[in-house]
Amino acid sequence: MRTEQALPVRLEDYRPPDWLVETVDLDVSLDASATRVRAKLQLKPNPKAAAPAPVVLDGDGLKLVGLKLDGNALPADSFVATADGLTIPQPPHGPFVLEIETLADPSANTQLMGLYRSNGTYCTQCEAEGFRRITYFPDRPDVMAVYTTRIEANKQEAPILLGNGNLIASGDIGATGRHFAIWHDPFPKPAYLFAMVGGKLGVIEDSFTTMSGRKVALKIYVEPGKEPRAGYAMDSLKRAMAWDEKAFGREYDLDIFMIVAVSDFNMGAMENKGLNVFNDKLVLASQETATDADFASIEAVIAHEYFHNWTGNRITCRDWFQLCLKEGLTVFRDREFSSDQRSRLVKRIADVRFLRSQQFVEDAGPLAHPVRPSIYREINNFYTATVYEKGAEVVRMLKVLLGAAGFRKGMDLYFSRHDGEAATIDQFVQCFADANAKDLSQFMRWYSQAGTPEVAVTSTYDAKARTYSLEIAQVIPPTPGQPAKEPMVIPLAIGLVGHDGRDLPLTRKDGHAVADGVITLTKPAETFVFTDIGERPYPSLNRGFSAPVRLTADLSVDDLRFLAAHDPDPFNRWQAVQSLATTLLLDNVLARRSGAAMREDDGIIAALAAILTDEKLEPAFVAQTLAMPSEADIARDLGRDVDPDAIFASRIALRNAIGNRLGSALREAYRQMSDGAPYRPDATGAGRRALKNMCLDLLAASGSAAAIALAMRQYSTADNMTDQMAALGTLSFHNVPERQAALDDFYRRFSADPLVIDKWLALQAVIPESDTLERVRGLTRHSVFSLANPNRVRALIGAFAQANQTQFNRADGQGYAFVADSVLALQAKNPQIAARLMTAFRSWRALEPVRRGKAEAALRGVASWPGLSGDVKDIVDRSLAEG
Ligand code: 0A1
Ligand code: ZN
């Protein structure tokens, strides 16, 4: 673990590497505690660099055993080797071969970076800076080399040996009981895409024939016995491969594509060339063990990692500041894929909810940073919602601005111009500019300016002149290191809805129609005038969430009710309901804080009633509309003086009112959606279950004993995890005897299945009651829990910190103390997971004074800990920084 404070790395300091590596020959002899790594690097001076320079290789915790230059052992005084680096001050002037031998202990690797073991399987994780934990290397993405990997191991312990690229040889090593495999990857790649695996694994196999007729072998490796749960992942992979050919003209390039699922993994999955390594929760699924949401995530992440083969691997990043070049773009691509496989509308709503709940919150606090940061200390801490989610929104805006055909032209140019390169965001955007003869220089501010733009709209209708104008101002709030901002390019899709519920034609003053219904803001304030408008219309703004902004408009409650019922853009129907609910919820939070009575509102109930009974709407959309803003949504919109108890009370009151007032409609919808059809994880089936379970939850929110009985019945009779889990979730929010009975039953049924036990842990962690903290503390001592497994930590402590607003934010500060203690207990073992847990404190300044004080004390306590890991220190320091 690195404990010393890393020096900041700055984008402006980028220099091309002094030395390039043409080929890497690795020879890895796997052993539980003493794995021997021999690396043969063909080095050559970079013609682009100022010669002659020393060779400086990165390392992290390495033990050097031997070093040769062009076949000769290097004298001790001609190099400097530490655990964290290897320098040869006076290397030859031309190309040479360096042979490095190191020893590693994979069983002791608890950080899960570099070479480690998961349930006995040897595996690697190299992004972002893990390869330097395997051998000394210029560990930066602009050094791309051709790798050949020889792996050997005890045949009993690791019968399966996998590497990047194609298998070129394998066999036994005499009578030693050991065997080997040699893998060759012909595509030059950065070290972060290196991977190897060795273990006892089961496999499912299939194949895919590419658009040019090449047959690709597909293999998914899992722990033995779990093969039957890998089928959906395989199906998703084949659909993703076909989709990328159709949507982007991208074909797979090796003869084999492999996925390995492991139980211990810091993130979701990793796009290593030809050998993706996955967190097993994003591979394994069956009707009995996975929910519809799990199936959807598997489909999306399998696709995401596959799509990286072009956006990330074939074209990689010049440096880690360009992370969004591969991540924002690849998230955009996986969202498009899911939209085409499922419902585009429902997917968009889910994505926008996620963006607002994660990225808007990040953008509004001390951890805010641009989509392309310009400074970092720990790159691991920049795999954020801003880089991924806002990064995807920025790519999406390019498509809105250029149209589908213009966007595709830009992508085609990007693929042809930069294939095989380590590129930058500037080069990416330049492709869209060149392909469409457009100036996108102002658009680049989306990459450099942090903060969510606030767009304020005022409308005026002039009946006499038959004009309607929108006066629109944009402000980008200050963020750390960026006190003042320049105006952005904001594409706003809009409609003006007439009384008959139809869009009026959008004609500008100059007589031209507004192309595609999109107006583009570029200035701090500007006015858009539409002519020949015969009635005062209802403005429908930022349709489909065309720009990731916070929009406020002078819409009355009546306007919102009209739009909720009639907006031809269904996304904005959903948005209108959310806006109505938000207004009510915020009013009631303030009322509660000041001791005034909360109000009930007919508008929102009437809007929901209309949507619930509209049979033309897809069930998944209705479910999304019935889902009221979360406690975190309300806290974010409040922005200051946040009292989670008041928010909870306000939200409970609204859900109670919905459950009571719409009881018969909810029961009817529940009945209609319970069709007894066999389970299928597709969008249609999932949508029906989503609506059914939303109805159940709202009925229970009314406090009805019949609804609790219904939930208990659904829990016991469900034939799939979605329905079972939803019923258990509903029960867990009510302090009734059935709750504990169901939780105990669930544990008995699934105690041998860690991925299902994660659901059981998470459910208990989010119970909004004052004894939850004790329950969670108790569960940390339960035999199913382990601080060494990231999934368990996220399920229990992560869920408590991120998804239990009232209990994490207990007024006595005990929730903060528990999470801070957990971070300290974890950080020496796994600094990455500890740092991520620490981000739960990111909104501490928005809390009301008592909680703010307690949260600050917890943060300062962690900051003062001796031997704090660099990863956690980076998060804590930025969280506490002023301004
Ligand atoms: N590139 C991966 C994300 C990832 C990043 C770091 C990791 O190290 C622990 C693992 C995975 C993706 O976008 O899926
Ligand atoms: Zn990715």
Image (cartoon, grey):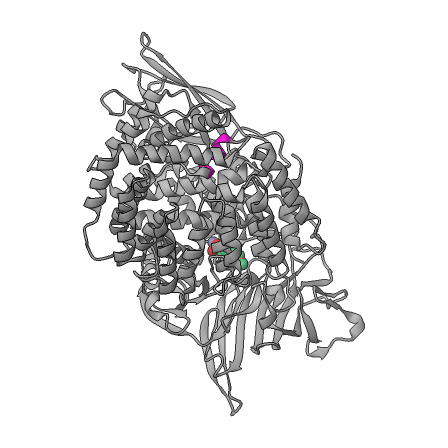
From the viewer's side, name the closer residue of 551 and 761: 761
Position in image of residue 396 (x %, y %): 41, 41
Q: Is residue 496 left or right of residue 65?
A: left
In the rendered image, the residue lying farthest to the front is 737
From the viewer's side, name the closer residue of 266 and 219: 266
In the rendered image, the residue lying farthest to the bottom is 175
Which quadrant, please, contains the C terminus?
top right
Q: Main secondary structure of the magenta part?
A: helix
Is 291 above or below relative to 544? below
Asked if residue 761 can be seen in this view, the reply is: yes
Is 47 above or below relative to 540? below
Q: Residue at x 50, y 27 (%)?
A: 593
From the viewer's side, name the closer residue of 697 and 236: 697
Q: Residue at x 20, y 40 (%)?
A: 668
In the rendered image, the residue lying farthest to the top is 464
Position in image of residue 241 (x %, y %): 35, 59
Q: Residue at x 26, y 44 (%)?
A: 706
Which quadrant, please, contains the N terminus?
bottom right
Position in image of residue 733 (x %, y %): 39, 45
Image quadrant where residue 212 sits:
bottom left
Is 516 above or below relative to 435? above
Asked if residue 320 can be seen in this view, the reply is: no
Q: Is residue 798 left or right of residue 213?
A: right
Position in image of residue 325 (x %, y %): 50, 48
Q: How many marks?
A: 0
Residues shaded magenta: 632-638
Image quadrant where residue 38 sits:
bottom right
Residue 457 located within the stretch drawn in magenta: no
Image quadrant where residue 203 sits:
bottom left
